[in-house]
Amino acid sequence: MKMRAWRTSDWKLWLVCGLLLSGCRVESDPAVAVSKGVTVTQSEFVQAYRAWLLRTGVQDTPQRRSAFVHDMAATRLAVMEAHNLGIAETPHYKMREQVLGRKLLLDLYIKRAVLDTVKVSEADVRTLYARAQTTVTARHLYARTLTEALELRQRLQGGAFFEELALEIFRDPDLRESGGLLPPFTFDEMDPAFEEAAFTLPIGQVSEPVRTAQGYSLIRVEERFTRPIITETEFQTRRPHYEAYALERAHALARRDYTLRLVDESRIVFNDQVLEALIIRITPGNEIFEQNLDSQELLRYGNPVQIWTVADFREHARFASDRQRAQVRTVADLRDFSRGLVVSEQMLLAGQSLRETQLYRTRLREAMDRYIVEYLQVADSVDVTDAEMRTYYTSAPANEFVRSRQIALRWHFFATEADANAAKNKGTNFTGPEELFFAHQLGPRSNEIFDASEGVIVGPFETNEGWILLKTGKQYPEFRQSFTEAKSAIYWALTEEKQREIRLARYAELILRYGLKVDERILERTNLLD
């Protein structure tokens, strides 16, 4: 089961991506750093620096701005120097270029063949936003094939219980003992198809077999809870982010569906005997394997028929990631892995013409420049001691590592404003759960809510779902986090600053030779909010 959490911090990082190695410069975008062959524009600096501030939690200072832009420019000089010294001719570079080139070609082909036609509606965006406020509790049973899933569903309809079937099919002790009960999850923490079923299935009803990336699931939703403090103003404020993410998710689903269709159309037929011999050969710790396996046929597919020997399979598999290869533990895993390779090769063949486009060349050059940065910074590991972190914490400005104020709230939903006002006048009883909220989560009503005394009913406020009354609870003022609470943020901020010092010292000769100049005046006047 795919587990992946997109939380508030992920949105921040997604909105302001990391270090850019290249970009467009326009007249209204002045340079903040210039040398022979390298320029850092104001917009590039803002985007990268703002992302770093959000990630580390430290405050903006002139010294940090200067160090950051020097590091950006010096890193670009190091990339340029690596090219001048012939890094593109080295074996490790060529292999990486081949791997990244294939991935880029697949992405561009999928975009042209599938994604360019995908659209999202207003309803899609609102549904996604509502799901981000919802928690689901559900049970599931897993099956590798559709036939197995249908058999399980038939047994459930015949009176079998999730608890007894979970004991049969799950190896995971938690799922076995809980009857397939999953921990509560929210939007984008599960496989997209699994999530779609979990958010739309009537509570208590068993789903039809749901095809996921790993196989098939039967799902029964036990509970769905939506936090009802969703105002129209808040939705409109966050709408661009959710609209972009709704499109991203629609793309992911379209890509998966297209891939599954290609698998079905390829009509892949495996040589089971060779498949079983190959899984023994590639499993770590096994010493017995067929010496002449490479020349034997592993699979055939398509029309006209294409044949892959084990040697062909190994050639294609070398472009897969270490993580993908590590997940192949059983014959069933090997089948799925091989299907993925077959489909990838078909798409690469269909998209060959894209290699000649300027977009492909530009994207590949940018990807390889990022790879060079990673390659050059492998040695930039540093040690951060507890004493250094404590010194960093005590010497930091008072407004760093601050936790915003919070308020505890209960609420009631109403269909109309009149119903809400009537309930308010009667002094309605708030028996629901109490949750803590930061001011930024409450939108433009936050001041009104925080100004109310404890135990007061405020509202009604209009939301996407109707009208809401809130009952205020205890407030928790803004405070500076203790060293223990801020320790993780301190560690990463200090680590990155020490790594930056190492790089600047290493690149000092480059900076001097290429005549790097930073315009401190423009840097100081730069508005990070633009």
Image (tube, helix red, strand yellow):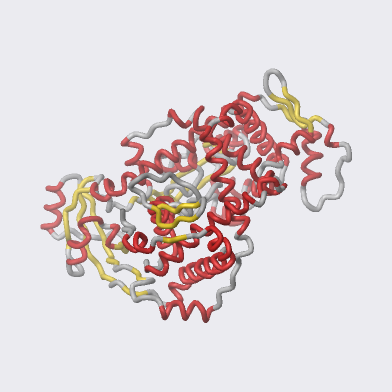
Q: Is residue 508 left or right of residue 520?
A: right
Q: Residue at x 31, y 56 (%)?
A: 529
Q: Nearer the viewer, residue 278 or 47?
A: 47
Please identify the residue farthest to the right as the structure is shown: 291
Answer whether residue 260 is visible to the viewer in this image. Answer: no
Indicate left or right for 455 with 242 as reference: left
The residue at 35%/51% (across/down) is 133
Residue 397: image x %, image y %?
36, 75
Q: Is residue 176 above or below residue 156?
A: below
> x%, y% of residue 383?
59, 73
Give me the residue at 66% from left, 42% from top. 320
Q: Report the side of 173 relative to 238 (left or right).
A: right
Residue 473 in the image, given as x and y percentages of width and height: 25, 67
Q: To which quarter of the image does residue 143 belong?
A: top right
Q: Would you say residue 47 is visible in this rendering?
A: yes
Q: Nearer the viewer, residue 234 or 365?
A: 365
Q: How many marks?
A: 0
Give the vertical position of 104 relative to 63 (above or below): above
Q: Between 438 and 145, which is closer to the camera in this rendering?
A: 438
Q: Quadrant location of residue 89?
A: top right
Q: Nearer the viewer, residue 398 or 300?
A: 398
Q: Is 198 placed above or below 36 here?
A: above
Q: Tell me the quarter of the picture where residue 385 sits.
A: bottom right
Residue 496 at x, y percent in the picture:
51, 66
